[in-house]
Amino acid sequence: MNTPDHRPTFSIVIGVYDQAEEIEQNLPSLLTQQYEGDYEVIVVDESSTDGTVDVLKRLKSSHPHLYTTFLPKYHFQNNRRRLAFTLGVKAAKYQWVIFIDISTPPPSEGWLQELAENVSPSTELLLGYIHRKNGEMRLQAFGSIDEARSIVNKAERSRANGHNGHWLRYLRGKYDFLVVRTRQGHDALRLFDCNVSGHRLLGQRVGIFFHNLFH
């Protein structure tokens, strides 16, 4: 159990591109979490062309734990979201990094508190699944990044820009957010780039389904 003096600390990392409306709607729920421990929100703007910059400036003025940076246009490639997350990890100053999409708002203002209650010294990585209709959250803990390799490989394989925040089903191993110790953040992101053959992917799908069915 985490005592008041030993609460986990979190850096929430988000990559955005031309998502001013979603930022306006969903970012405040991340910035106003009811959590007494330290946390920060890092938004990496992938050189948006809409009103993203103005929205972020306005929110920064009233939320000092919001930090923003940007990914220059010359870095644009198929996996720009992976690059944005990499910048976020480099900027993170707390114990745990949370990768989440701006289109996936937390289910409640107690979301961080629930995460804090589910991390332990033996945990290296958590995958989170959110039920959009009832707001229930399910967490899947791993003692090492390698244990989560097949799930992350499969979930990220078909998403060129990385995790896109859609409602993803637990039994299929498609998560809504990923939590990892900051010191392991870059190692976790390397899983986003792994190429998986169609034959291996089929095996992963079957393995993940039966693993999650009984856990």
Image: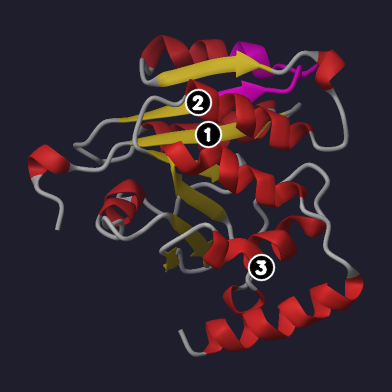
Per the image, the residue denoted by label 3 is 150
Q: Quadrant of the C terminus?
A: bottom left
Spatial separation of the CA atoms under disc 2 and disc 3: 27 Å
Label 2 environment density (alpha carbons within 10 Å; few <14, some 14–19, many ≥20):
many
Determine the CA span between mark 2 and mark 1.
Answer: 5 Å
Count of numbered circles in the view: 3
Q: Amino acid at mark 3?
A: Ser
Q: Is residue 118 left or right of residue 81?
A: left
Which is nearer the N-term, disc 2 or disc 3? 2
User: Along the horizontal axis of the image, is 29 left or right of 173?
Assistant: left
Q: Secondary structure at mark 3?
A: helix
Q: Quadrant of the N terminus?
A: bottom left
Q: Position of residue 36 (x, y in %)?
A: 19, 37
Secondary structure beneath label 2:
strand
Q: Name the residue tied to disc 1.
A: 13
Q: Position of residue 96 (x, y in %)?
A: 39, 41
Q: Are marks 2 and 1 in contact (CB under 8 Å)?
A: yes
- Residue 52 lies within the magenta run: yes
Quarter residue 206 falls in: bottom right
Residue at point 53%, 52% (across, down):
178
Q: Say if residue 132 shows up in the picture.
A: no
